Image: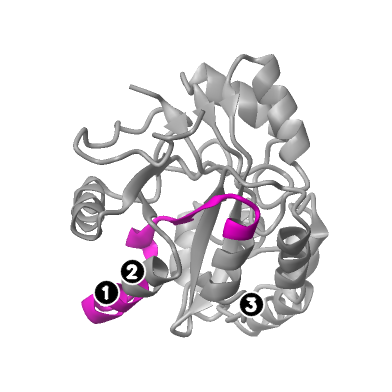
Amino acid sequence: MINADLHCHSTYSDGVLAPADVARRALAGGVSLWSMTDHDEVAGQREARAAAESLGMRYVEGVEISVTWADRTIHVVGLAIDSTHRALVEGLAATRGGRDGRGKVIADKLADVGIEGAYEGALQYAANPALLSRTHFARFLVEHGYCESTSEVFARYLAEGRPGYVPHLWATLEDAMGWIRGAGGVPVIAHPGRYKYSQLEFGALFDAFRDLGGDAIEVVTGSHTPDQCHEYADVARRYGFRASRGSDFHAPGEIRTELGALPMLPSDLTPVWRDWQ
């Protein structure tokens, strides 16, 4: 069995560790096949590959693209991409645009409920200011005692319907799929258990994804409960999707599981990495 971790983040997006530090943590967790998938950014791929190969791990380049579908945000991971592919790089740059303006609106909304200085505070946690995200705001709120954990921050302030939530128009599903496939990669729907869609909407999403050439979803991920792992294993069986596995690691203490510590994929599912050399 291959201990693969194909979803995690570094300081190039909203992680707190540099790529080499994430690589060492992955190796310590027993990972043998690794991909770093920063949000809408591929600038750290060369560092990640160099670190992985120096440690003896197999590495595939990756990215996690923010997508607006049916008026909500979903994420599509691209695996085994060419991170220098021009259309991908330019598309990601366009997708990142607007994060700063969104951050200022989030800060204004938080100020309305008595939380001052959130924009400047969140920036202190963003190694890459162009990728300012809700996670950076969450870390600021935890550090200043408004909540005990980043998950509590999202539940109280930053999730849809909460006082600090600000929607953003990201890439389309068609664009994200085109960039990934154009770069020679494999599109994967990330952590489907996190999305608040009805059964009918989920069916439409999976149909659209398949029609655009997608054939893989994350089944085992740090964002899924055990019941959700079983649920999306069934989805993979029903649609004939390949299965991916990744911790969604951002920072020590902010996830349910460590790099490499996830359960293995069900043995009857086809791993997304099966045909990779």
Which residue is painted at 78% across and 59% down in the image? Answer: 86
Q: Is residue 132 left or right of residue 157?
A: right
* Three-letter code for the amino acid on which mark 1 is drawn: Gly
Residue at image mark 1: 203
For disc 1, the neighbor class at 10 Å (few under 14, some 14 to 19, many from 20) is: few
Residue 3 visible at all: yes
Residue 202 horizontal/vertical position (percent):
30, 73
**Disc 2 and disc 1 in contact, CB within 8 angstroms:** yes
Nearer to us: label 3 or label 1: 1
The answer to whether 191 appears left or right of 31 in the picture is: left
The answer to which image quadrant residue 27 occupies is top right
Q: Which mark is residue 110?
A: 3
- The kind of residue tagged 2 is Phe
Give the quarter of the image for residue 41. Answer: bottom right
Q: What kind of element bears circle 3? A: helix
Identity, as a three-letter code, of the amino acid under mark 3: Leu
Q: Position of residue 70 (x, y in %)?
A: 43, 84
Q: Which residue lies at the image location 62% right of the left edge and 81% below the top edge? A: 169
According to the image, label 2 marks what residue? 206
Query: SS class of the residue under badge 1?
Result: helix
Sequence-wise, the earlier of marks 3 and 1 is 3
Place of residue 196 in the rendered image (x, y in percent of width and height, measured from the top left): 34, 73
Query: Which one is earlier in the sequence, the residue at label 2 or at label 3?
Result: 3
